[in-house]
Amino acid sequence: MGQKLEVDWQETAPELRRRYRKESHCERRTRLHALWLLRCDKSLKEVAALVGIAYRTLQYWVAWYRKGGLTEVLERIKGHGRQGRPSQLTPLQQKALAAKVALGTLRTIWDALQWVEGRWQVAYSYGGLYKRLKRLDCQPKVPRPRSIKADVAAQIKWKASGLGEALQEAEMNSSRQVWFSDEMRFGLWGQVRRRWGLRGVKIIQPIQIEFAWQYLVLAVDVRRCQLHWAWANRMNQSNLMPIFTAWSPDAVIWDGASAHRGKAMGEVGFERIFLLPYSPELNPCERIFEWLRARIEGEVYATLQHKRCEIEHHLRRLNADKGHLKSLIGWAWIQDAFAQLPA
């Protein structure tokens, strides 16, 4: 058995076991495991074999424990407390860089490299500036489109009070069914979508090009967190009127398309509230369409009916997942406008 190990233990075996089980760092977890086994009166030779380390390495750990306790053992990790090389940019310059990135004018890391060097004469490597941007909480993002004809000030006013005033003018109350609605054309004209791949290896994606499509007519009930949908062959009054007659909402909020403003549509029996021109981003239906395209595009479908079934499958799953659906459509300014409606 050899001579018994003499160590002035500062922790009990259960305490070391608890620390070992909670530790997420791989190297520290191994050291805590070894110390726990030693605290359970196992020999150095047994522990080294069980943990899978050299006998001499375990002797070093024991010596460190005798010198400074558990803290000394856990701090002697490569990179522990290391500050790393200081940034080439001052804190103020880093804030300016983050503000520039937030404007969305830099398309690539190369653009950021040129901007930093031109502004402050600081030469970064590609990887160095990439890591610096990551530390500044910057990442690649897909911009949300906005028409150049859109009135930004009017959109801000619509979110603050415009929707609430429109609902009151239409004499809506909290018991009425007020839905947002829009249409999106889905067909067999394929689109390329971003995918994961290996660096330097091309991804070949088959593209389907067929002139076949249908319109998905979508209605979003934000307050009740529900989706309603149907299909139309054309986006005109004669195709939309039967759908909304069957749904029978009290009011519909949508854009000013000709099929929405038509005289016959006004006789269906619901109030029509029109969004601002060139402002699809005010309609939560657009968020659902964006979510759908990310999941169905980039594939080849045997027929239009197959793609339609796939779309309805995703819509049913989303409609059942209220938490996820609310994160997509439960915009605060819409909830505030509905909350102001009389009972």
Image (spheres, rainbow, N blue to C red):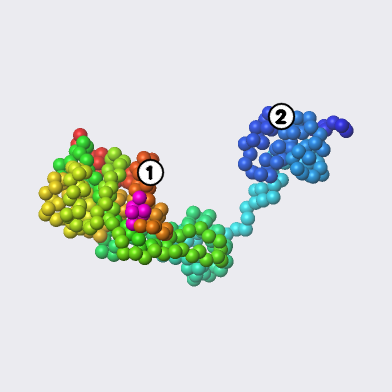
- Residue 317 appears in the figure: yes
Q: In which quadrant is the C terminus drawn? A: top left
Residue 164 at x, y percent in the picture: 22, 45
Q: Quadrant of the N terminus?
A: top right
Instruction: Give residue 13's mark.
Output: 2
Q: Nearer the viewer, residue 143 or 12?
A: 143
Task: Provide residue 25's location: percent of width, then percent of height.
Answer: 64, 43
Describe the element under mark 1 as helix, strand or loop.
helix
Q: Amino acid at mark 2?
A: Ala
Q: Amino acid at mark 1?
A: Arg
With 192 as the anchor, is 28 left or right in this view? right
Q: Residue at x 25, y 60 (%)?
A: 278
Precedes in sequence: disc 1 or disc 2:
2
Q: Secondary structure at mark 2?
A: helix
Residue at image coords 42%, 62%: 192
Q: Which residues are magenta?
A: 304-309
Query: Dot 1 corresponds to which residue?
Result: 317
